[in-house]
Amino acid sequence: MNTIWVLLIVISVLFSFLNGRLDEFTKAIFEGAKSAVEVSLFLLGIVSLWLGITKVIESSGLIYRLSGFFQYFVRRLFHNIPPDHPAITSITLNFLANLFGLGNAATPLGIKAMQDLKTLHPGGETITFEMMVFIVVNTASIQLIPFTVIGILADYGSNNPSAIVLPTLMATFLSTLFALGILFAARRIFK
Amino acid sequence: MKTVSFISQLIIPVFILFTILYGCAKRVRVFDCFVSGAKGGVGVVFRVFPYLLAIFVAVKAFQTSGAFEFAQESLRGLLEFFHIPIDVVSIALIKPLSGSASLGVFTNIAKTNGPDSLASLISAVIMGSAETTFYVLAVYLGAVGIKRTRYLVPVCVLADLVGIIIAISIVKFFFQFS
């Protein structure tokens, strides 16, 4: 993360200078700061909302029923997590929210999943392999139907906007597989 | 298509209703329970904020600096060799960085090239099959205060690159352009 951040900043300053956009650079960092505040306020609402709902799911015991669903796959992927650990459920819920393209639910549930994963290794500041698996699946995107994109294509008068559904599904599926492959290969190399 | 979008609209309301009714059936004090859970949200967002700020500032600066145009120009030769529209570069570069910006870029591609063009189709598939990697990293790592990420970031970047190549290949294969 450190390298990426330094690179982004250094390249930006360099190019702003070369393109004579130093003024825009300064404006851009303030704008960036502003949108971080806006996004955080938005997150504050939805994260609290979903944490409230997951609390109800936990207290009512619904959590054990939900995790039965879809759980085989999650357990296989995370075989180091005890099967009755809450992380299994929050990971399952996050994956389901992603599948259905419910971004506003996926992020809070993902945060919950990260916190549950953290309880397995409390206090550490180093990432665990399970957290990496979880993040890689999330960054590879596992959405089933891209509604927004189809909507935009349709708006501009596409003949068949849903023609992209099948290719998108295949691309999503393959890129998630490859992403996990790369992660597991990296574990071999860097162990 | 209509039924599918109707079902997807149903998911959240039904899920919430079901959760609350199930709680009532199990004699949980649903309201108090919800409030005590929601309390945790403030702490999480507080912890995530500095990470988000760092990422948003860097991404915004990168966007305005003109580095994008430079990357696009330097990849032009390579893309022409593979018969890939140049617009694909901008969507491939912006998607891992920013969700709202990539939506803007995509809308623009659909408008200027036409929604059934190769550029629009490839961009559409990239939009649907890639994620805003750096936002996800900032939020999820920030939420639990992870500082040492080992090999996670290089893996994500490489996976994004492979994902984009896969998206381009699949569209070319499906729609038989060459």
Image (cartoon, coloured by chain):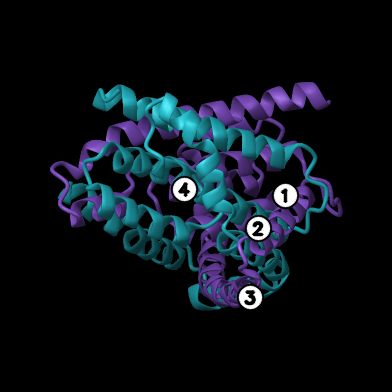
Chain colours: A purple, B cyan
Q: Which badge, 3 or 1, comes first in the chain's sequence?
A: 1
Do callouts 4 and 3 point to residues on the same chain? no
Which is more foreground, mark 4 or mark 3? 3
Q: Are marks 3 and 2 in contact (CB under 8 Å)?
A: no
Where is mark 3, residue-wise? A23
Location of mark 4 (residue): B90
Name the front one of labels 1 and 4.
Answer: 4
Query: Which residue appears at 82% of the width and 53% of the height?
Result: B147
Q: Label 3's element? A: helix
For disc 3, the neighbor class at 10 Å (few under 14, some 14 to 19, many from 20) is few
Name the residue at 49% across, 29% down.
B78
> How far from the left and from the top, in percent, is residue A122?
83, 52
> Does label 2 lie on the same chain as label 3?
yes
Q: Chain of mark 2?
A: A
Q: The C terminus of chain A appears in which quarter of the rendering? A: top right
Are there few (<14), some (14-19), or many (20+) residues within 10 Å of tag 1?
some
Left or right of B169: which side holds A187?
Answer: right
Distance between the alpha carbons at the discs numbered 3 and 1 = 23 Å
Tag 4 secondary structure: helix
- The foreground one among A128 and B25 is A128
Q: How many residues crowd mark 2 within 10 Å: few (<14), some (14–19), many (20+)?
A: many
| Circle 4 residues within 10 Å: few <14, some 14–19, many ≥20 | some
Q: Name the residue carrying label 1.
A: A4
**Which quarter of the figure has residue A76?**
top right
Instruction: Name which residue type carries label 3.
Output: Asp
First in sequence: mark 3 or mark 2? 2
Residue B168 lies in what quarter of the image?
Answer: top left
Residue lying at 63% horizontally and 39% vertically, measured from the top left: B157
- Of marks 3 and 1, the one in the foreground: 3
